[in-house]
Image (cartoon, rainbow, N blue to C red):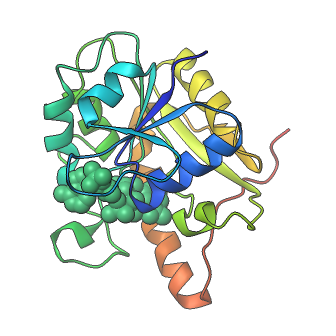
Amino acid sequence: MPAPIAIIGGTGALGFGLAQRWDRAGVPVVIGTRPGEHPPAPGLEALPYGAAAEHAEIVVLCVPFRSQSETLTNLRGHLRRGQLLIDTTVPLAAAVSGKATRTLGVWQGSAAQQAEEMAPPGVRVVAALHTVSAARLRDPDRRLAEDVLVCGDDDGAKRDAIALIERIPGLRGVDAGGLEHARIAEQLKALLIGIDARYRTQAGLRIAGLP
Ligand SMILES: NC(=O)c1ccc[n+]([C@@H]2O[C@H](COP(=O)([O-])OP(=O)(O)OC[C@H]3O[C@@H](n4cnc5c(N)ncnc54)[C@H](OP(=O)(O)O)[C@@H]3O)[C@@H](O)[C@H]2O)c1
């Protein structure tokens, strides 16, 4: 039995949507949740963040930007060299009561680069899944047909992340360059939130011209 994927913040909109889709695709998943904050997810194993991360080779971080740094500080003793950390964080201005169509400046350049700075040495950090709509993921009747930009400085880590993302039918992973490009992927989510509001939809991304 392969190690499960740990989804930190896996009771949330994005985390639970991913958990359901991967579970349906036969990928073993464990939900990381803060004790007492949420009832365990029905049908899926739920553990405190640290224990969930220790169980996994791949950890997907799905917490709000305002708690990204605290969560990674608390996870420091639980993450280990060689693990893949997929950061999905979008630093929306909504985190500080601003507009959801704007992003905050992050000193490191992006939320993903902040994650890399905070993760223990040897943890392979990749940024992905920013432009995927949680609402669409969570609707089992919605067929997905979209691209997921994957940014990171370790080609092997990006390949592993793309393979995992593509276990979800209808998602195609696209190598979008180094981790410094995560800033652009994160900002695209703010753009899509505005498009969602204007067109009353849940927009995604499709890159034309790929082989
Ligand atoms: N929603 C989307 O469509 C979408 C798409 C792409 C990326 N993202 C990114 O994914 C991350 C999660 O977004 P979301 O929409 O899933 O958020 P959400 O529904 O609020 O869920 C976030 C989860 O994070 C955990 N958490 C940890 N610290 C928290 C805190 N201080 N306050 C609230 N929850 C906290 C909670 O799980 P426990 O209480 O169980 O620990 C919660 O269920 C964000 O960084 C967001 O930018 C979201």
**Residue 42 sits above or below residue 13 on the image:** above
Q: Where is residue 157? Give x, y as percent.
A: 52, 20
Q: Is residue 105 visible?
A: no
Closer-to-camera residue (174/26): 26
Relative horizontal placement of residue 73, taking residue 170 as reference (left or right): left
Task: Determine which quarter of the picture holds residue 17.
Answer: bottom right
Relative horizontal placement of residue 210, taking residue 146 as reference (left or right): right
Task: Determine which quarter of the picture holds residue 140.
Answer: bottom right
Ligand 1 image-quadrant field = bottom left
Q: Residue at x 21, y 35 (%)?
A: 72
**Residue 57 sits above or below residue 60 on the image:** above
Closer-to-camera residue (87/47): 47
Q: Residue at x 57, y 58 (%)?
A: 132
Where, quadrant-wise, is the N terminus in this rendering?
A: top right
Where, quadrant-wise, is the C terminus in this rendering?
A: top right
**Residue 35 sits above or below residue 122 on the image:** below
Closer-to-camera residue (111/107): 111
Q: Residue at x 55, y 69 (%)?
A: 135
Q: Where is residue 19? Give x, y as percent.
A: 53, 46
Closer-to-camera residue (170/9): 9
Q: Where is residue 49? Give x, y as percent.
A: 27, 36
Q: Residue at x 29, y 29 (%)?
A: 116
Q: Is residue 23 visible?
A: yes
Relative horizontal placement of residue 113, taking residue 184 as reference (left or right): left
Q: Where is residue 66? Give x, y as percent.
A: 19, 56
